[in-house]
Image (tube, rainbow, N blue to C red):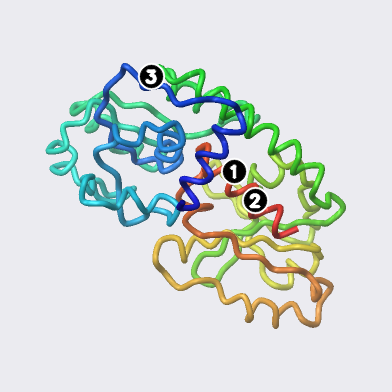
Amino acid sequence: MKPVAFLAATLLTLSGTSMAATSVNERVISFDYGSLDTLDALNLGKQVVGVPKQGLPSYLSDYASDRLVDVGGLKTPDLDAIRQASPSLILVTGRQGDQRDTFEAIAPVMEMGVSGENYLQAFDANVMSLAERFQAASQAQSALDSLHQKIADTRQEIDGSKEVLTVTHNDGNYMLNTHPIVYDVLGLSEPQIPASVPTETRGTRTFTPLSPQAIGEIDPDVILIVDRSAAIGNEEANVEALRQSLANGAAADADIEVMTPKLWYLSGGGLQSLSLQIDEVRNAL
C-alpha cells in the first residue's frame, strides 16, 4: 500500500469509521493541494477532475495520472484547460487571488486558505466546510478526532525543551518562519530574536532575514528548513555550507533538518499533509 493510502486508511480505521458513499457528485478542480489530500483521505478523490500537476507533492502523485486534466500552475492557471474540464467546483487559496473573478465565471469557487490566529480551529473549519459540501461530515469529524489525538500524543512525545528555529530558504538566503504547525499546533516555543537581528517591513508585512551570524545569535538547538527554492524547482538549500558558516559560532552544534519542500511550501492544510508535517517535526526532534 502506498504511504498516502496507508495514511488515509489509518486515519479512518483508528476513528472506527467506515466510508459511506456520498450522494453528492461534483467535478472538482483543486488549486489547493491540502484540500486535494483531504478529499483523497475521505475517499472523494474520484470527483477531482483537474489539478496543477507540476507542483504536486510526492504523496499526491496518483493525481498526476492522465485521468485528470493539468490545469496549469498554482499561480499561472490554464483557463482553456479549466473550461474543458467542465468543473462544478473550483478550490482556491490566496495564490489564485487575482484569478478568482475569472474562475467564478466558469464555476462556483471555494476559498480554502487556512488563516486566523488559531490555526487548528481554522483548519478544522476548512475540513468540515469541504466535507459538508460532499455530505461527508461524519467521516471528516472522525478523521479530525483521530488527528487531534495524534497531535496530543505528539506534544507529549517531543522534547519541548529544545530551542527550535524554523527558517525559509530562498535562493541561498534564509528568512524567519513562524510556522503554525511547529509553534501553534505542536506548541513549541517561538525563538527569542535578539534586538541586534534586524527586521524589514514590506507593505504591511514584516520579515526577518537571517544570516548565519544572526542564526548564531539566536543559538537554536534545532534548525528546521522549509526550502521554497527546492519546492518550485530551483536550487535547493546548501545545508553543508550553512553548517560550515555556523561551525565557529554559538549554533555550531545545532541539528539542521530540511523538511520535505513541496509538502511544507506548496501543500499543507489537509488531513494528510498536517499528519505528515507532524511526523516530520517529531522525527526532527
Q: Which residue is disc 1 drawn over? A: 275
Q: What is the distance, in whole Å, between disc 3 and disc 1 at their CAs?
A: 23 Å
Residue highlighted by disc 3: 133
**What percent of the width, then of the height, locates residue 47?**
29, 32
Which part of the image, by quadrant, shows the C terminus? bottom right
The kind of residue tagged 2 is Asp
Residue 172 vs residue 190: left or right? left
Q: The residue under label 3 is which amino acid type?
A: Arg
**Residue 98 versus residue 225: which sits nearer the camera?**
225
Identity of the residue drawn at 40% across and 29% down: 111
Left or right of residue 96: residue 103: left
10 Å crowding of disc 2: few (<14), some (14-19), many (20+): some
Q: Residue at left 41%, top 38%?
A: 40
Image quadrant assignment for residue 85: top left
Are the residues tagged 3 and 2 within 8 Å (C-beta)?
Answer: no
Q: Position of residue 268 (x, y in %)?
A: 51, 44
N-terminal of the two: label 3 or label 1?
3
Cα gap from disc 2 to disc 1, whole angstroms: 6 Å
Mark found first going from the N terminus, 3 or 2:
3
Q: Position of residue 80 (x, y in %)?
A: 13, 42
User: Decide: marks 2, 1 in contact (CB < 8 A)?
Assistant: yes
Residue 246 position (above or below residue 148): below
Q: Which residue is mark 2?
A: 279
Q: Are marks 3 and 1 in contact (CB under 8 Å)?
A: no
SS at mark 1 in the image: helix
